[in-house]
Image (spheres, coloured by chain):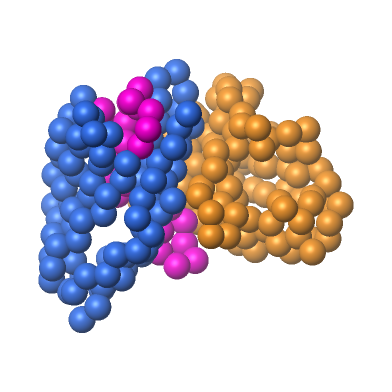
Chain colours: A orange, B blue
Amino acid sequence: EPEVTQTPSHQVTQMGQEVILRCVPISNHLYFYWYRQILGQKVEFLVSFYNNEISEKSEIFDDQFSVERPDGSNFTLKIRSTKLEDSAMYFCASTERGEEQFFGPGTRLTVL
Amino acid sequence: GEDVEQSLFLSVREGDSSVINCTYTDSSSTYLYWYKQEPGAGLQLLTYIFSNMDMKQDQRLTVLLNKKDKHLSLRIADTQTGDSAIYFCAESYLNTDKLIFGTGTRLQVFP
């Protein structure tokens, strides 16, 4: 069964460093998303992406964040200068039509 | 605004039914979802219901939607130890495809 994959599973970085989180959505899906879950808190929407552009973003998704689909398979989230409060589990999701979003296993980001 | 609430914890005996509840504030939802999160894992889509439906059954899972009370529930029949996980309800709305998640309910199944 096709699934969303994410790498790395765990990323540790120093405050102020740039990180890139990678996702490979399900191959025939057209809509892509990033969510995050701070430990013990709700899963929060960050950004949605369709047709090579951002379709919606939350207040969390400020100028430090960017997304890209550099080729036909990968979907990346970049955080330019990480802060302690960026420590969270980051989930990528994709969908073919919009109703069913399928999530990846997540990348745990730890900012020291 | 959009707010989705769930009780934090539910403990049931193996073989019993579990009922996980969710309340929401925004009545303009289009779809309502249940996701399962096992320890250290991602979010697994269990089932979803269109907002004009009252009920959906899928094997051991039954989803009930009461739009008047803005209440969604997930019933798991014959609960097994493998059902132990955190269960999230989530909503989507017209003109947006972002999901709004609840706080999650930790289901613990004991023998």
Residue at 44% over, 43% down:
B101
- Kindly indicate the quadrant of the structure image that contains residue A59: top right
Residue B34 colored in magenta in the image: yes
How many dots with numbers? 0
Query: Which residue is farthest top?
Result: B95
- Kindly indicate the quadrant of the structure image that contains residue A61: top right
Query: Residue A53 location, x and y as percent?
Result: 63, 23
In the image shown, does B8 or A109 lie closer to the viewer? B8
Residue B44 seen by the camera: no
Q: Please give left or right for residue A63 compared with residue A76 in the image.
A: right
Magenta-tinted stretch:
B24-51
Q: Please give left or right for residue A10 compared with residue A106 in the image.
A: right
B69 versus A52 height, above or below = below
Query: Which residue is farthest right?
Result: A16
Quadrant holding the C terminus of chain A:
bottom right
Query: Residue A72 location, x and y as percent?
Result: 60, 34
Residue at 73% over, 48% down:
A20
Residue at 71% over, 62% down:
A110
Residue A63 seen by the camera: yes
In the image shown, does A40 or A52 lie closer to the viewer? A40
Residue A84 colored in magenta in the image: no
Dominant SS of magenta comes to strand
Query: Residue B87 location, x and y as percent?
Result: 35, 55
Query: Residue B85 location, x and y as percent?
Result: 36, 64
Q: Please give left or right for residue A18 compared with residue A55 in the image.
A: right
B63 versus A68 height, above or below = below
Q: Please give left or right for residue A94 compared with residue A67 in the image.
A: left
Residue at 53% over, 60% down:
A40
B12 versus B26 height, above or below = below
